[in-house]
Image (cartoon, rainbow, N blue to C red):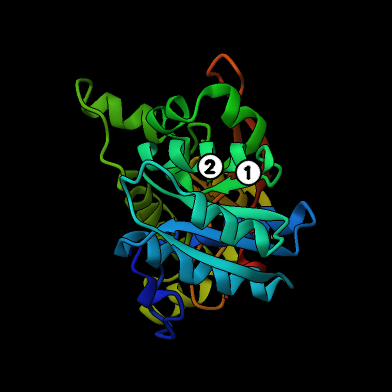
Amino acid sequence: MQGPDAALDHETNPYFWRDLPSVTVPSVAVALYARRLGYAQAAIMMTEDQPTQDFKGPLVQAFQKLGGAIVADVAIRPGQTSYRTEALAVINAHPQVIFTETDPVSAAAIFDSFRELNQLAIPFIGTPATASDDYLRTITYQGAHDHLTSVLGAPLPDRAGFQQYYHRLYPDRQPPATAPHAYDAVISAALAIGQAGSTDGPKINAAMMAVTNPPGTPCSLYADCLTLLRAGTKITYAGASGNLYYNRYHNVFGVYGALRVDPTGQLQWVAVMRDLELDKAAP
């Protein structure tokens, strides 16, 4: 399964396997990064549109699960020239950090309001949308560097031979976004067949975690992994889309990072949050 629907986060069908992280994982990553920095009290400033509000629910749940508390939740109506009232509501709640996602124009006005009221004394942690160049340029690279960290999926090296094989077949195309996940579904199932020594469905299903989850010797190419299996070595398949560390609901979490822009506009990774950490933090 490559669909990110949150309704599948706690799927209990034993034949269900999802190798694409849920839409809720970025929310969990934001909460985890904030708690890693020691922030226990947070405010939320996000636009009132439905996609952004959908991001907020899992963020609140994960932050509370990790011991944090939400002390203010201020919905932003886009397009205002000032957010002084909203900023005051946040400041008066005394948060240690502000979770945010807005459009770039609203963000500029929000930052101006906080600059006027408290010199932007409260740091911001943003969703993946806050890492766009439009967003960063609008609040200025210097302002973003000093006061904002964005959390999003971390890039992975080409593994499992996916790019090599794809471009050999389709030299003039870029692969669709979910193609690496579909590729990993095929390879991991093939390795589970090798582990099970059978093409019997229940036996393959029972062997899946044995070839994907730690502990084990990492391997990426199917032939290399199969050689290890035949030698009796426990493996963990390091896929084209990332590690396939399945939790009890047969979901994966991927790797997320915290990113900050420097004053010249260059993006820099400042932290990484890995699969197993995200799984523990997920509500």
Tag 2 residue: 113
Name which residue lies at 59% across and 36% down.
259
Name which residue lies at 50% across and 57% down.
86
Farthest residue, direction bottom: 12
Count of residue discs: 2
- Crowdedness of circle 1 by 10 Å Cα count: few (<14), some, many (20+)? some
Tag 1 residue: 117
Above or below for 162 versus 142:
below
Name which residue lies at 50% across and 70% down.
58
Asked where in the image residue 18 lies, by quadrant, the reply is bottom left
Q: Is residue 232 visible?
A: no
Name which residue lies at 71% across and 64% down.
41
How far across and down, in percent of the image, does residue 79 sit? 31, 45
Q: Is residue 137 left or right of residue 99?
A: left
Closest to the observer, 25 or 146: 146
Q: Secondary structure at mark 1?
A: helix
Verify CB contact (< 8 Å) between mark 2 and mark 1: yes
How far across and down, in percent of the image, does residue 39 sit? 75, 58
Closest to the observer, 47 or 211: 47
Closest to the observer, 174 or 213: 174
Closest to the observer, 72 or 190: 72
Farthest residue, direction top: 264
Q: Which mark is residue 1?
A: none
* Spatial CA span between label 2 and label 1: 6 Å
How far across and down, in percent of the image, does residue 118 sit? 68, 43
How far across and down, in percent of the image, does residue 210 sit? 59, 66
Above or below for 133 versus 279:
above
Farthest residue, direction right: 38
Q: Amino acid at mark 1?
A: Leu
Q: Amino acid at mark 2?
A: Ser
Q: Secondary structure at mark 2?
A: helix
